[in-house]
Amino acid sequence: MLVISGVMNGAIYGLVALGFVLVYKSSGVLNFAQGYMLLLGAYLFWFFKVTLGAPIGVAMAAAVAAGFAVGALIERLALRRLIGQPLISMITVTIFLALVLEGLVSMTWGTYPLQHVEVFRESTLRLGRIVLTSQNLVACGLALAAAGALIVFFRYTRIGLAMRGVAEGHQIMQSMGINVRHILNVSWGLAGVAATVAGILLGSTFGFQLGLSQIGLLAIPAAFIGGLDSPEGALLGGLLIGVVESVVSGYVGNAAGVPAAFAILIATMLVRPYGFFGLERIERV
Amino acid sequence: MLTLTNVEVKYADVILVLRGVSLQIPEGGIVSLLGSNGAGKTTTLKAISGLLRTELGEVTAGAIEYRGERIDGLDPERVAQMGIIQVMEGRKVLKHLTIEENLRLGGYIRRDASRADLDRVYDYFPRLRARKGAVSGYLSGGEQQMVLIGRAMMARPKLMLLDEPSMGLAPLIAAEIFEIIRRLAAEEGTTILLVEQNAKAALRTSAFAYVLENGRVVLEGPSASLAENEDIREFYLGMSKLGEKRSYREVKTYKRRKRWL
């Protein structure tokens, strides 16, 4: 039971972690605003669904499209000018970007949790001693599907290949006539998509509230454990963190779950600094 | 095809690297650009390809014209799309990608890049075909250089700027690379601007050559006649007047002045 519910949460962690990976891999920046992009995505969905009264599918599609635009816009406005500047200034920008996004959300929608939206029909499913809600199942399925789609995109499409190339060096790509800014823009957009999908799923499970951005922090160990530059690793890392958190908080106590996740992160860093699926540093002697 | 007129390049607004370089590169054929470390060879190539702009360099005077069109000041992506591809020195493969992925990215800017393009590259470099799934970071130096040239070929450039393709390679492999360069010009009709420190091989490969020193062109002429030039023989080919290999015993006692300074 604990394992199952861990997998459910883990799929969403994985999706958020994937957002980190997409940005890190192409631009080398750890995007601290990822959790807040998620928050904004969730609220945008709520806006389309409740305020405008759109049907669920339309609201989702609109929110995902808006999520892409938000990601791309952040890249265009805040980070493009910093290309070639020290990394630390980019990372600082993302940290404060997080605060700006949060402020934007609470300014527009207030700080109280929003009215609950029933996104998926509630029903329970019993498998022996295990109780599942359809809500959980659908959320988990969608998270896995979204993560899978992004991974396939990364591995097999032309732009995905270019994104992996950009990860290795901007100048090399420019010497081949590839527009690095364009590729970075798409990566940020996709990170926005991952964040928005995760935001919708989380919001429909835990309610649409400012606390949703917290998951951004929990997804960081997931991304690191899998290897910051490996999309598959991010997903698996997310599942692992989800299970550990759920099992530990079940057996040891609620407070121990999150620290356990971070303990695993530190242990992983000691053994394999580039994560379990990260690219090894290639050095020819 | 490409004309540089009195090109001056500054880095970060203060460091003057090229002090008025003029080159003429005719359509078809190979032109080589020689010079010692720090002479400005790589900077010249980067000024042409626009990569200068990614590292705080700027063409501050003079003009670079490609088929009658000014290209100094254009973004490197734009220059590449016009058909000028630079192969950078230092064997900069995309290490984590396979050979074939490297090549496919080379053809990224051409919407119509196809299987046939890959095959054409593999015909020039059979060794790459045999190892096309290998991660390119683990290849030997010669193989990496082949990946780079192949990657540039994928874009079907009209002008290829080659920066020290023989650097750090075993003599046999280097000879193989020079042979490929000759074939590229002869069979594909690609114009090539070759930057080299290996002056002997470069003069044998090219039809015309420029010698760069301290950011200026100090000598130019048909490669065959430059190879006979006494100064070139002395300073770049390591020969004495009599044409025999110079003994290192004499180096300290006798130093010829460069006559062009």
Image (cartoon, coloured by chain):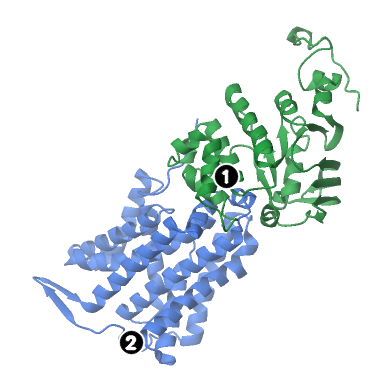
Q: Is residue A203 placed above or below A171 in the rendered structure?
A: below
Is residue A247 or residue A182 the one in the foreground? A182
Identify the amino acid type marked 1. Answer: Arg
Question: Which circle, 1 or 2, is nearer the viewer?
Answer: 1
Classify residue A245 as left or right of residue B248: left
Examine the image and state in which quarter residue A45 appears. Answer: bottom left
Chain letter of the residue beneath label 2 in the structure image: A
Chain B: its colour in the image is green
Is residue A12 or residue B4 the one in the foreground? B4
Identify the amino acid type marked 2. Answer: Val
Q: Can residue A69 be seen in this view?
A: yes
How many C-alpha atoms fall within 10 Å of the one at disc 2: few (<14), some, or many (≥20)?
some
**Secondary element at image label 2:** loop
Q: Is residue A222 placed above or below B245 in the rendered structure?
A: below
Residue B147: percent from the left, percent from the top? 55, 39
Which chain identifier belongs to the blue chain? A
Examine the image and state in which quarter residue B192 appears. Answer: top right
Q: Which residue is drawn at 28% across and 63% down?
A: A242
Residue B151: numbered disc: 1
Classify residue B17 as left or right of residue A183: right
Residue B175: percent from the left, percent from the top? 62, 25
Q: Do the residues labelled 1 and 2 touch (CB within 8 Å)?
A: no
Q: Is residue B99 placed above or below A94 in the rendered structure?
A: above
Chain letter of the residue beneath label 1 in the structure image: B
Residue B157: percent from the left, percent from the top? 66, 48
Residue B223: percent from the left, percent from the top? 80, 28
Q: Residue at x 40, y 92 (%)?
A: A53
Residue A119: numbered disc: none
Q: Is residue B166 placed above or below A122 in the rendered structure?
A: above
Residue A117: numbered disc: 2
Quarter of the figure that contains the N terminus of chain A: bottom left
How many C-alpha atoms fall within 10 Å of the one at disc 1: few (<14), some, or many (≥20)?
many
